[in-house]
Structure formats: structure tokens, C-alpha cells
Amino acid sequence: MSRPTIESLLQIMARLRDPDGGCPWDLEQTFATIAPYTVEEAYEVADAIDRKDLHGLRDELGDLLLQVVFHARMAEEQGAFAFGDVVAAICDKMVRRHPHVFADEQVGDAKAQTVAWDEHKRRERDAAGHDDTSALAGIARGLPEWQRAVKLQHKAAKVGFDWPGPAPVIEKLHEEIDEVRAEFDAVAADPTDAFARDRLEDEIGDLLFVCANIARHAKVDVGSALRRANLKFERRFRLMEVMAAAEGIHLSTLPLDAQDAYWNRAKREEGK
């Protein structure tokens, strides 16, 4: 049997979406219903990379490719575009944005290439008739909010609106923590105060925005850092459960101070 190609995948998707004998679930889907799966698959690709699981990465990239094929098929059914048009568009874009590779332009280094890339994107937006001239133009609203925060900060920094270094950002973090604490106190004083709860949400948002700014100044990817924190918490909590179970105890039966003792044991165990 010959090795499957992209054409094989396109034919499979066409069959799944065929009103005459296709899959009922696939036939019910729309761009809106498939979009969350597309985002999820992209995160699973990132997770496989984070775990250095190349076998898993192969499978996750296939799942992500299926999402592209799914969207392209639905667009083709509406007469908008087909998979081939998607391929042609990205090929054209990559050649157009790399004139130092595919044409005669010169670029000094990766930093200069980043500047040139942004300028190509700006010209493309202008050519497409986009009338947003803000320095913040072009940041997709569908991005995860932590990623959007970093992009907003990065674009503002390009016109000089930025902290000079991490120290004032850390000072701002302490200021935001104090403001969050004050709003927690306001909510505790009157849990029915909708305005206090709204202010609390607003201040927590400011706190998270500053945390993203700290990561940007540290040149640390927020998503990667949070993934590491999540993995660390999960690893230690599961170890707590194992330790307690080995002593015939379920964590849910213990008060917080006893659970915290297991947490500290788990931390020490990791340090061995």
C-alpha cells in the first residue's frame, strides 16, 4: 500500500463531510464549533514539545493538520476557498516576507529581520485596507489573554512606552497586590456589593497584566513558565497523595496544616 499523502487526508475529510453517508458529527460542525478544538490541538503540540515527546509530537501535529483541513473543507463547501488556496497563501506570504532569502534584499541579523517582518505586516495591513493606525494594530483578539497581554506590552514598548527595567515593574507588582488586598477586604465587608466584586476582578486583571510584564522583561515565555508551575504543582500533589495513601490516609480527611506537611515532604523528596 502506498504511503498516504496530504491528498489522502483531504479525501478522508471530504468523505466525512459528505451529506450522503458522511459522519453525522462532522457534518454538524461549523467554523465556530471547531475553533476550540483547533486551539486545544495547538496547545497539545506545545505540550508534546515541552515533554520532549517526539513520537507524541508527530501525532499532535497530525491532529493540528486535521484542523486546518477541516476548516479548509468547510470553506470549500461554501465556495470561499480550498486547501490549495491556504497553501498558496502561506507560500506567497513566506516568500514575500523573506526578501533577504528569496530576493536581493540584505538583512543584518535576526533582530533586524524582526523589524523588517513587522514592517512587511504593516504594509500588508495597509494594502488590505485596514485603517487602524495604532501602534497596537494587528494583535488578534482570539489569542489567549496572557499572550495578548505580552504582545500589547511589546508593541507599546516599540514606541518607548515601557518600564526601563524589571525593578519598577516589581514595585508595580507590590502596588497591585496591595490594591487586590484592599478589594478583597471590601468584598468581605459586604459580599453583596457588586461594585466591590467588579473592582476586585479589575484589580486581579491588573495584577496578572503586571506579572506578564515581569515575564516579558525577564525574556521568559509566560505560557512556558505557567506550564512548568502547573506541572510542578501536579507532580508534588500526586506525590502527596501517594505518601498519604502509603500511611492509610486520604488527603481529604486531613486539616490544611497536615496536608501542608505532606506538601513539604513532597518538596523535600523532589530535592533528593
Image (cartoon, rainbow, N blue to C red):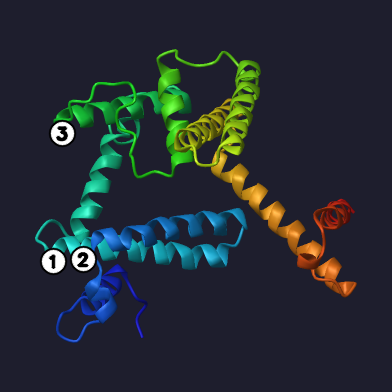
Closer to the camera, 96 or 41?
41
Callout 1: helix, strand or loop? helix
Task: Identify the amino acid type marked 2.
Answer: Arg
Q: Is residue 59 left or right of residue 271?
A: left
Pinpoint residue 161: horizontal percent, then vertical percent. Answer: 45, 14
Residue at image x 60%, y 20%? 172
Residue at image x 17%, y 60%? 75
Residue at image x 30%, y 28%? 137
Closer to the camera, 200 or 110?
200
Task: Identify the amino acid type marked 1.
Answer: Glu
Callout 3: helix, strand or loop? loop
Q: Which mark is residue 128?
A: 3
Residue at image x 87%, y 54%? 261
Q: Is residue 173 left or right of residue 67?
A: right
Q: Quadrant of the N terminus?
A: bottom left
Q: Quadrant of the C terminus?
A: bottom right
Closer to the camera, 102 or 115?
115
Can I make out residue 176 in this image?
Answer: yes
Q: Which mark is residue 73?
A: 2
Q: Is 4 above or below relative to 105?
A: below
Pinpoint residue 158: horizontal percent, then vertical percent. Answer: 42, 18
Q: Count of labels shown?
A: 3
Q: Which mark is residue 77?
A: 1
Q: Marks 3 and 2: in contact by CB < 8 Å?
A: no
Q: Marks 1 and 2: in contact by CB < 8 Å?
A: yes
Callout 2: helix, strand or loop? helix
Mark 2 vs mark 3, CA separation in Å:
25 Å
Task: Identify the amino acid type marked 3.
Answer: Ala
